Image (cartoon, rainbow, N blue to C red):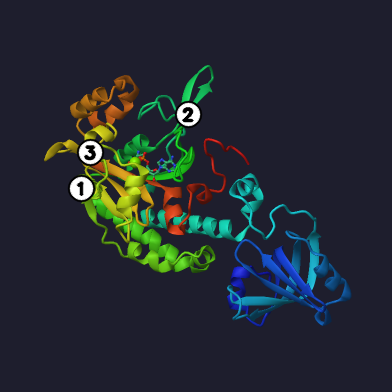
Amino acid sequence: MTELISIEDCRQHVDQEVRMHVWLTDKRSSGKIVFLQLRDGTAFFQGVVRKNAVSDEVFEIAKSLHQEASFYIKGTVHQDERSHFGYEIQISDLKLITNNEGYPIGNKEHGIEFLLDHRHLWLRSKRPFAIMRIRNTIFKATVDFFENEGFVKFDAPIFMHSAPEGTTELFHTEYFGGDAYLSQSGQLYGEVGAEAFGKIFTFGPTFRAEESKTRRHLTEFWMMEPEMAWMHQDESLDLQERFLSYVTGQVLKHCQYELEILGRDPKKLEPAAQGNYTRLSYDDAVKILQDDGRDFKWGDDFGAPDEAFISEKFDRPFFIVNYPTTIKPFYMKKNPDNPKEYLCADVLAPEGYGEIMGGSERESDYETLLKQIHEAGLNENDYSWYLDLRRYGSVPHSGFGMGFERVIAWICKLDHVREAIPFPRMINRLEP
Ligand code: 4AD
Ligand code: MG
């Protein structure tokens, strides 16, 4: 029987007869020929139906197809230099499955709210297709990278009994007559994993009840959080640089087609794949802002416009290291050379994207950590198990968190992170 292939596989089947499962994205006909724009989830390409090459019945079906009709085709693959994809199929037979009129997303411009309301269908279009395939490549590259570095995948829970980093950004839910919160980070559990398995990474959904309506905030996003026992902050920065270079390199290697669909110039990503990321101190970042005449004082946290301004100056991701302790969470380790700052770093993406990752060395001394919990106004009883990690076998350790959608938004050059996740959750959006 004729081989069943995907559109993506065409390259290996030039001039061969094949079968495919496809959907119609667009159609154009002129007398004796019908051009079908087809998709199958792996790529988009053109099918050509010539009246003299098929039965009358098949030709009539081809002419009657509506957008998103689903059907089987048989035909011969040809190279097609004029098309973006590079191949097309001359169809010899077609068997219809469904063919309904009225698909709401046409090939004209639609407003973003309309598209988001129809996200369940919009995901079939070219642009979301390209973004989700890049998301998938980043996911695979992440797992491969950490496996190669000897990490264990370690899952953190989503329901939390207490609020590890304060309650202001937490979603609350009732839990059998008591209270629970949705996780805003798996980190503290990741630290448990590091002391049990050495090097771990978590990957899962994360929830933030932030009232931020910015282009980089979701209320539900995915975070990957590695945690490394016996590792100091400088080695963690090396690891973060290797990680991001690898991920960008894999996208450049495997996603040329997707980047082209998005109109994303791969040259802009090449420096990121080369490594050599600048380590800018918080103090120097402040100077950059002040030299520009901005009203920014030492000790302030960077807002999105500040980060955008600094990040325009770089052609690849870079670190801002050692923030003042007043603007970072309690679990970080103070810099022994300057107790006003933590041994921490954020990674900012270039082209104005700002923060995509953040991490630190963790305080590993029991008494110091307890003091920092008190200073942060937190209840030590909520941290008794976390403090146990410092009571028994405590070692220097470091970790970081990568905001998956933030990285995708930068790599794909999106205007907003909402396009980086299949079903975005924002203050004003819970559907579909
Ligand atoms: O900087 P954050 O809050 O750091 C943590 O949660 C640490 N516990 C990470 C760690 O050290 N293990 O969040 C980490 C990353 C940010 O750098 C950002 O990329 C992303 O998560 N992020 C968001 N992404 C989308 N929407 C939001 N509302 C986000 N908040 C943070
Ligand atoms: Mg952060």
Q: Earlier in the sequence, mark 3 or mark 2?
A: 2
> In terms of image quadrants, where is residue 210?
top left
Q: Secondary structure at mark 3?
A: loop
| Residue drawn at point x = 61 percent, y = 53 percent | 123
**How far is disc 2 from disc 1 in space, using C-alphas?**
37 Å
Q: Callout 3: 10 Å neighbours few (<14), some, many (20+)?
A: few
Give coordinates of residue 109: x percent, y percent: 63, 57
Q: Quadrant of ligand 2?
A: top left
- Residue 179, placed above or below residue 346: above
Q: Nearer the viewer, residue 265 or 59?
A: 265
Of circles 3 and 2, which is in front? 3
Residue at image mark 3:
297
Residue 394 seen from this side: no
| Residue drawn at point x = 25 percent, y = 38 percent | 362
Q: Secondary structure at mark 1?
A: helix
Q: Callout 1: 10 Å neighbours few (<14), some, many (20+)?
A: some
Of circles 2 and 1, which is in front? 1
- Residue 196, placed above or below residue 64: above
> In terms of image quadrants, where is residue 28?
bottom right
Q: Nearer the viewer, residue 5 or 409?
A: 409
